[in-house]
Image (cartoon, rainbow, N blue to C red):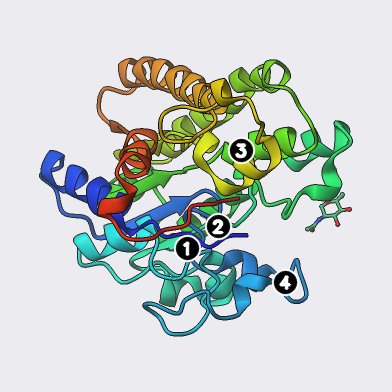
Amino acid sequence: MNMVSLFLFVVCVSTTLSSSLPLGYDRIYSFGDSIADTGNFLHSGALTNPVIGKLPYGETFFHHATGRCSNGRLIVDFIAEEFSIPYLPPYLQIAESLKLKAEHGVNFAIAGATALDAKFFYDQGFGQILWTNDSLTTQLGWFKKVKSTMCTTKQDCDSYFKRSLFLMGEIGGNDYNYAFFVGGTIKKVKRMVPFVVGTIIAATSMLIEEGAREVVVPGNFPVGCSAAYLTLFGTRDKATYDRNGCLKYHNAFSKYHNDQLKLALDKLRQKYPQSRIIYADYYGVAKALFHIPHHLGKFLFTFL
Ligand SMILES: *[C@@H]1O[C@H](CO)[C@@H](O)[C@H](O)[C@H]1NC(C)=O
């Protein structure tokens, strides 16, 4: 379900990052879902025999399953490489020895995570399909724990985080996935967008208040090109598909989320001029891949 070959995105994202940011980074803090999870879900033990705990997951680079939802490295791994930072340890794996193991940053991302709290999905009656309850709120709580072991006064913390890169997401994709997978219509799922975007913005604000100076906030992928959506929502009606064979209306939905997110980030930049808030266009980079697949060899793109 989660075989992800993302390395091409990653090359593009990290190149953009390094050319637009003059600073180097000493550490990275990553929040999000399976797109960035380097082992939290596997370590959480939420499933007794998860498929990501076995080959072929991990086969092309680490040569064993690491808990990444990928055969190779993730975007966050390539960003770490770009700045000569060790691959980020998953929070749940190092929670007992933070002071020792969190000096280059920590990864809080966990597969299946939502931006909105798990309670929202339980209240809506589709909690049973949630992979994890460790939503953004939980991940921010973990971050605060890490922070408290690293610095104390505001001045101390501001200086500690000055050369830190914060990756807020990708997150929010699962909020919509879960809603679509239980049969939500595009019109209905669209009503969630202000809440999901609001939650991402609140989390970003909180990080800035805690001392973050450089935050990357990625948008959602063109979900209409993903194997899961193509399987669930495939039709015989050719008009449903774009020229790349992707589901048009689901891609338009992702774009709608991204547009709302970008507007909200503009406002945030005005509020926090001292911080650099960078939107990462995962949609655009992924779209380009779907347009020229024959140039890139085979790749399979799904996500949760
Ligand atoms: C999430 O919380 C619900 C309700 O409190 C609980 O029933 C469920 O087992 C939890 N799920 C996981 C994966 O921990």
Q: Do the residues under discs 4 and 1 have CB atoms within 8 angstroms?
A: no
Q: Amino acid at mark 1?
A: Thr
| Residue ID for mark 1 | 149
| Residue ID for mark 3 | 115
Q: Earlier in the sequence, mark 1 or mark 3?
A: 3
The kind of secondary structure element at disc 3 is loop
Question: Which label sits in the foreground, 2 or 4?
Answer: 4
Gap between marks 1 and 3, in whole Å? 25 Å
Q: Do the residues under discs 3 and 4 have CB atoms within 8 angstroms?
A: no
Gap between marks 4 and 1, in whole Å? 25 Å
Gap between marks 3 and 4, in whole Å? 21 Å
Question: Which label sits in the foreground, 4 or 1?
Answer: 4
Q: Earlier in the sequence, mark 3 or mark 4?
A: 4
Q: Is residue 114 visible?
A: no
The kind of secondary structure element at disc 1 is helix
Q: Is residue 203 left or right of residue 263?
A: right
Q: Earlier in the sequence, mark 4 or mark 1?
A: 4
Other residues around mark 2 within 10 Å, as few (<14) / some (14–19) / many (≥20) = few
Residue 45: numbered disc? 4
Q: Residue 85 at what x, y percent from top left?
A: 26, 67
Q: In percent of the image, x 67 and y 31: which residue is there?
A: 235
